[in-house]
Amino acid sequence: MRPRKQRRVGHSPASNYFKPRGVPMRELMEVRITVDELEALRLADLLGLSHEEAGEQMAVSRATFGRIVGKARKTVADALVHGKALMVEGGPVAMRPGPEMRRFSCRTCGGRWDEPFGTGRPQVCPSCGEEEVFRYKDDEMGGEQP
Ligand SMILES: [Zn+2]
C-alpha cells in the first residue's frame, strides 16, 4: 500500500530557486513549495482551469486540489510580500508525459528525457552527448502513449 497517492504533474519547473535581489544569504528567509503545489498554480492561475478540471489533471479530488492551490498561493504570497527566497522542491508527484511529449532514453548513460512531437529525432543524448538514443513508452502510466 502506498502511503500517499501520487499527484500527476505535466510540467517540471524551469527553475527551482527564486531569491530576492540584494538580500544577503545570512538574512535571507526561505520558504518552500512542492512541485505539485507549483503545478496547481500553473493549472489554476496560469491556465485558468477550474478546481474540478485541474484536480482531474492531477488525479486528485476537487477538494484536495483546492487545498493544494490554497497552500501554494499563501506560500508564494509570503515570499513576495516578505522578500523571502522561494524554493520549489519535492512533493508526492509522478511526471505525466503529456500527449505532446515523446520519451527518450540513452543506452550509454541511462539518461531519460522528454521531447515534444515535431522536433525530429534527437541526434545525441543531452546528458552525455552519445548517439545511443532510443524512444520508449512509459508503461507505468498505463499505456497513454500511442
Ligand atoms: Zn547519455
Image (cartoon, grey):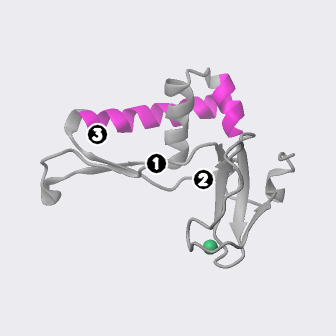
Relative height, residue 127 to residue 144 (above, below):
below
Q: Which residues are magenta?
A: 52-80
Determine which residue is flagged by label 2. 92
Residue 13, position as x, y percentages in the image: 49, 47
Q: Relative to the observer, which residue lies in front, 23 or 59? A: 23
Relative to 87, 119 lies left or right: right
Front: mark 1 or 2: 1
Q: Secondary structure at mark 1?
A: loop
Left or right: 16 as drawn, with respect to 104: left
The kind of residue on which mark 2 rests is: Pro
Query: Mark 1 or mark 3: which comes first in sequence?
Result: 1
Tell me the amino acid under the disc marked 1. Answer: Ala
Given residues 122 and 116, the one toward you in this image is 122
What residue is disc 3 on?
Answer: 79
Q: Residue at x 54, y 35 (%)?
A: 40
Q: Nearer the viewer, residue 43 or 126?
A: 126
**Residue at 27 percent of width and 35 percent of height:** 80
